[in-house]
Image (cartoon, grey):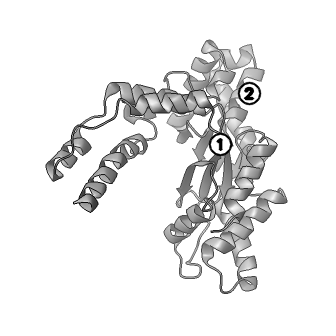
Amino acid sequence: MWIALGVIAALVAGVALWWKFRDPLRGEDFYKFHVERKWAWELILDDEQERAFMAGLEAYDEESTVFPHRESGALRVYDPSMMISLFLLTEQFAAMGPQALADPAGAVRHLIDRAAHSETGGVLHLDDDWMAEPVDGMDKYDFTSAMMSATHAQGVDGGVGGYGDEDGGYGMLTVLVEMPQHVARMYDDAHSHAAPGEIRNRLDVYKAVIEEPEPEFVAGLESADAERSRFTNTLMYDYGRVLAGYRSMRPQMPQAQPSDVMSMVMARMLSDSLPGMTWTRQPSTEQYQRALELISTRG
């Protein structure tokens, strides 16, 4: 009986996480871009600048698709294939002054084109064809799964977000050195509105899964996520260059698990500031060390 109730409780607890991650751009907002100004990278701009910047992104999206990872502060550009820090873009947009407000579409296009010509800090060029054939029996999906393991060491806290795109050939690791107390209270308050009714049987589980979350829970969780984004930083990395390092290091570690080899490769890329890895904003010493621990400490 206790085992059954434990499984049911786990299912219910997973509902909130499923809802949160089922649609990173909250459905209709994908094509609108004009949403509440709340993420840390948006707050670099004032209200007028932010509206202009989002209009510029929307215009660029109509020509060449982009995907904003809002909470991580990163922009996926599909053609040419690359990742750009949204902190970098908003800072550059603000620096353009009245010119950007007069022609936001042209300003955003100029900034993205400039990023395509130079892989500077906050810019990561990608190769969509990064894996031509399986490696060590791994296809790109297996490789992505191993990468997720390689960037979330057991026993190390601080990895609050991970993302892998096997088709685009990139991954992201979002780190938080310490959860501020006021943010923790915001999450506690949000979850206090998410408690399900009494779970007595399988039918109650189904009801909990299909019902829409409480509006107070949704609003509270989004506010907590936005506030937390002020204290996080995201490391972006290119699968293609991790794979090149993996091929080079694999003969030295023939008995190791693939994720352990990837861990060694990525730790070297980060510690030696090698190409193929960059942050969405300049990391603090603590953020850098936490990312290195998450990557290089194996369980």
For the residue labelled by badge 1, is the local secondary structure a helix, a strand or a loop? loop
Question: Left or right: where does residue 219 sit relative to residue 237?
Answer: left
Say if residue 121 shows up in the picture: no
Query: Which amino acid type is marked by label 2?
Result: Glu
Which residue is rendered at x = 73% and y = 69% of the image?
A: 264
The residue at 56%/77% (across/down) is 133
Report the quarter where the C terminus lies: bottom right
On residue 176, the disc is 1
| 72 to 255, vertically: above or below | above
- Residue 150, given in percent of the width and then of the height, sits at 62, 65
Where 159 falls versus 54 (above or below)? below
The image position of residue 20, as x and y in percent, is 41, 40
Circle 2 crowding by C-alpha within 10 Å: few under 14, some 14–19, many from 20: some
- Residue at (60, 62) in percent of width and height: 154
Q: Where does residue 40 sit, x and y in percent of width and height?
A: 63, 28
Q: Nearer the viewer, mark 1 or mark 2?
A: 1
Cα–Cα span, label 1 and label 2? 22 Å
Circle 1: residue type: Leu
Of callouts 1 and 2, the N-terminal one: 2
Q: Position of residue 79 (x, y in %)?
A: 60, 48
Count of picture labels: 2
Q: Which residue is mark 2?
A: 91
The residue lying furthest to the right in this view is 272
Q: Nearer the viewer, residue 277 or 154?
A: 154
Q: At 59% from the left edge and 70% from the top edge, which residue is drawn? A: 131
Image side of residue 171 versus residue 191, left or right: right
Mark 1 neighbour density, 10 Å: few (under 14) some (14–19) many (20 or more) = many
